[in-house]
Image (cartoon, rainbow, N blue to C red):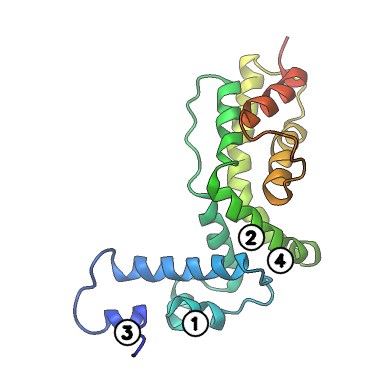
Amino acid sequence: MTTVSVDEDAGRGRKAPGRPRDARAAEAILDAVTALLAEGQSADAISIEAVATRAAVGKATIYRRWPNKEALLIDAVGRMKGPLPVLAGTSVRDDLIMLVASGRNPRMEQYGRVTACLIPEMVKSPEMHAVFQAVIEPRRNVMREVLRRGITSGELRSDLDVELTLLMLVGPTIAQNMLHWNPAVPIEGYAEALVDAVLRGAAGR
């Protein structure tokens, strides 16, 4: 039985069913990166050749979409987190709860495993640390906007340290997702409990 790659299938002069060829190839490539990371391979060990083999595409197909491995990793890890959340804008508390809860959905379990595999590379490689920062910075910006809005509206203290508050909201979730750091903390009501604990010190008078 002959294995037909995504590229070869598209070259037979017929339209493949379902999504367009380019979209299917891109998804196969990103899925391949995610699978390799989730299996415990380090970012350094993953090669474009290995990704191409797993995705059943040619290396040229990958390089047409991503200039290098770092750019591919950014997209693959970012894709696991899903699209940026859309804020309701009703209150700072409600928006923060929604943002924290979005980091505790089932998709984040796989993201946590992959991130754990990337930690050694992030510690020793400035390039990989930059990759991780590029993935999470857009989400940090969303939470920053909520905190700054709260300062302006008076919901939060005027002297609030935005970056430290951001760390207090995100850090525990990362620890729970990746390490199940404290099994005594229940999943049910986690987002509400964390936000309320932070707001007890951050709320405006």
Q: Which residue is mark 1?
A: 53
- First along the sequence among labels 2 and 4: 2
Q: Is residue 186 left or right of residue 105?
A: right
Which image quarter is the C terminus in? top right
Disc sitting over residue 127 in the figure:
4
Badge 3 crowding class, 10 Å Cα cut-off, few under 14, some 14 to 19, many 20 or more, is few
Q: Which residue is mark 2?
A: 114
The residue tagged with tag 3: helix, strand or loop?
helix
> Quadrant of residue 154 in the image?
top right
Q: Is residue 116 above or below residue 11?
A: above
Q: Using the numbered discs, state the Cα–Cα distance from disc 3 to disc 4 in whole angstroms.
A: 34 Å
The residue tagged with tag 1: helix, strand or loop?
helix
Please tell me which residue is depicted at 34% across the width and 84% down the height of the picture. 4
Please name the amino acid that badge 4 sits on: Glu
- First along the sequence among labels 3 and 2: 3
Please name the amino acid that badge 1 sits on: Thr
Q: Using the numbered discs, state the Cα–Cα distance from disc 2 to disc 4 in whole angstroms.
A: 17 Å
Q: Using the numbered discs, state the Cα–Cα distance from disc 3 to disc 1 in whole angstroms.
A: 14 Å
Q: Using the numbered discs, state the Cα–Cα distance from disc 3 to disc 2 in whole angstroms.
A: 30 Å
Please tell me which residue is depicted at 53% across the width and 77% down the height of the picture. 51
Q: Residue pushed farthest left?
A: 14
Disc sitting over residue 9 in the figure:
none
Q: Is residue 205 above or below residue 117?
A: above
